[in-house]
Amino acid sequence: MMEAPQSLDRPSQFDHQQHTFPSYQDIITARDTIYPYIKTIPMRLLHADISQDQKVYLKTENLQINNSYKIRGALNVISHLLNTDDKTLFRSGIVTASSGNFACQLAYSLNIRQVTTELTLVVPTFASQQKINKIREIYDHVRIVKLEPNDWIEIILKNKFDPHSLKIVEGSLNLDTLPFYISTATNFHVIAGSATVGLEIIDEIDDLNNTCVIIPYGGGGLTIGVATAMKHANPNIKFFACEVETGAPLKASLENSTPTYVCFEPSFVDGIGSVTVIPHMFEEVKTLIEDSLVVSLDEVANSMKLLYDDYGMVTEGAGASSVAAYLKYKSTVLKDFTKVVCLITGGSIEPGIFQSLINKPCLA
């Protein structure tokens, strides 16, 4: 378990430049860019354990190419780089820090857009070996670097590091000699691409009044993007993040009204969870959501089993956390909504781990 202090007492370590987030028009542009390459998957209705007078929609991005919504952001950012005048951006390679899904989709995007460059992927030691193997199968020019969780999270939080020495860089990076860093959480074009999920939800639900959306919370980019897209159609739509109790910094940060550290324990839910939030992302997210709904590992495992038994769907822990959150809070926080959308973000998980989880009896 990773221990941490309760709050950020050294905010200067997390200073960022002025950040902007995609507008609705940016998201429309991203949709036009990526749609030739991705799947459009109709939502399904959840039938089991539904509260009376509610419709619960499943946005099944676990059925997307390579089993993750992150294909959207990865394709959009690579397409954007290809369309820039600066063709030297790929000369020194690309680097990202990812638990696996974004790295896989970045490799896929480089492949289908026929870009040859060195791709350096910084992953935590707990990253799924299945995801790493898939990355190597997709793209030939890959360097995998594994870091201890604390060091890996530090890179994501600071969003700036020297990919050769793998040390944090406090000053400017010389992009003529260093790989181009793409943040899975904070990159403008990644967020815009991810936000296209929200456009598809809008297209499928006729009446968005009294609707809420539950979104697994990692770095915050998906939450910001989807909320921006959907609030343009109906500003009354409500949004909830969901986290797992083994690492729920957003909930703690909302309660304390400031970025807060929590203890984080790696688990089979490897796509969400951290020791803290990214401060500038938190400042935006807190204006868009109602709350963060926290669930247990057992509740996530039960939801994975339900989705497999009822739909034959393989989901990873992070993806199923939205369904777990609905089932836990349907009679309390969510009881007054007539339509609930659960965003299932991914389905990439070690087969042995998945089998062990769905073969266990459901736990109350």
Image (cartoon, helix red, strand yellow):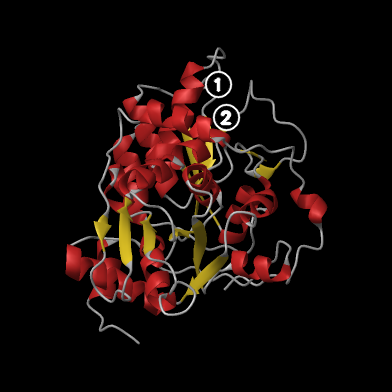
Residue picked out by circle 2 = 180
Residue type at mark 2?
Phe
The label shown at residue 283 is none
* Viewer-proximal residue among 68 and 21: 21
Q: Quadrant of the N terminus?
A: bottom right
State whether residue 71 is above or below residue 109: below
How far across and how far down the image is residue 363, in percent?
A: 33, 85
Q: Is residue 34 visible?
A: yes
The label shown at residue 89 is 1
In percent of the image, x 38 and y 79: which residue is there? Answer: 298
How packed mark 1 is, by other alpha carbons closer than 10 Å (few <14, some 14-19, many 20 or more), is some
How far across and how far down the image is residue 66, in percent?
A: 30, 44
How packed mark 2 is, by other alpha carbons closer than 10 Å (few <14, some 14-19, many 20 or more), is many
Q: Quadrant of the C terminus?
A: bottom left
In percent of the image, x 50 and y 23: which residue is there? Answer: 81
In percent of the image, x 45 and y 77: which residue is there? Answer: 296
State whether residue 287 is above or below residue 243: above
How far across and how far down the image is residue 30, in percent?
A: 45, 30
Q: Quadrant of residue 144?
A: top left
Looking at this view, name the residue that lies furthest to the bottom. 364
